[in-house]
Amino acid sequence: MSDPLGFVTGASGGGLNPVQPSGAASKPGAPGFREVLLKNLEQVNSAQQDANRAVEDLMTGKRSDVEGVILATEKADDAFRMLQAMRGKVLQAYDEIKQVRV
């Protein structure tokens, strides 16, 4: 599969950056979408691990603050729901891109 517009390789055919709209300056050293996505996935995973650990500690008696356990569980749930919403938006954008005729 060829990449004439440079969407995959990052090279642009017409002097425009395909990721940035024309006139928008790219920031040197700014993280890309992939890096931001992976960082957010790690944060969601960490929140879920913290919630699991808090529930286990409560069940084994190492912890007695139910409020803290509920807070950790709600935080992990909110993070996961936001991740699912982002996934839905990305899939929606992908479906729209698939509909574009070239």
Image (spheres, rainbow, N blue to C red):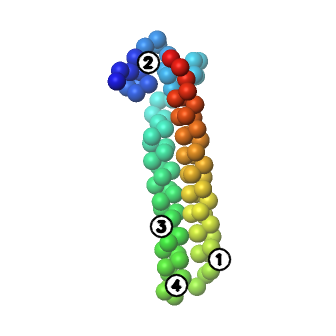
User: Which residue is more in the foreground, 40 or 5?
Assistant: 5
Badge 3 density bin: few <14, some 14–19, many ≥20, Cα 10 Å = some
Amino acid residing under circle 2: Leu
| Residue 91 seen by the camera | yes
Q: Position of residue 96 (x, y in %)?
A: 58, 31
- Position of the N terminus, as image quadrant, is top left
* Position of 84 relative to 25 (above/below): below
State which quadrant residue 10 falls in. Answer: top left
Taking 23 as reference, is 50 left or right? Answer: left
Asked whether the beta carbons under mark 2 and mark 3 sit within 8 Å of each other, the answer is no
User: Which residue is more in the foreground, 81 or 95?
Assistant: 95
Look at mark 2 in the image and give the residue it sits on: 5
**Measuring 54% from the left and 40% from the top, which residue is drawn there?**
91
**Label 3 residue SS:** helix
Asked whether the beta carbons under mark 1 and mark 4 sit within 8 Å of each other, the answer is no
Badge 4 density bin: few <14, some 14–19, many ≥20, Cα 10 Å = few
* Position of 62 relative to 4 (above/below): below
Label ID, residue 12: none
Q: Disc 2 or 4, which lies upstream in sequence?
A: 2
What whole-number distance in Å separates the C-alpha atoms at marks 1 and 2?
53 Å
Look at mark 3 in the image and give the residue it sits on: 49
User: Which residue is more in the foreground, 47 or 26?
Assistant: 47
Label ID, residue 67: 1
**Label 4 residue SS:** helix
Q: Disc 4 or 3, which lies upstream in sequence?
A: 3
Q: Disc 1 or 4, which lies upstream in sequence?
A: 4
Label ID, residue 59: 4
Q: Nearer the viewer, mark 2 or mark 3?
A: 2
Q: Position of residue 16 (x, y in %)?
A: 50, 16
Amino acid residing under circle 3: Gln
Asked whether the beta carbons under mark 1 and mark 3 sit within 8 Å of each other, the answer is no
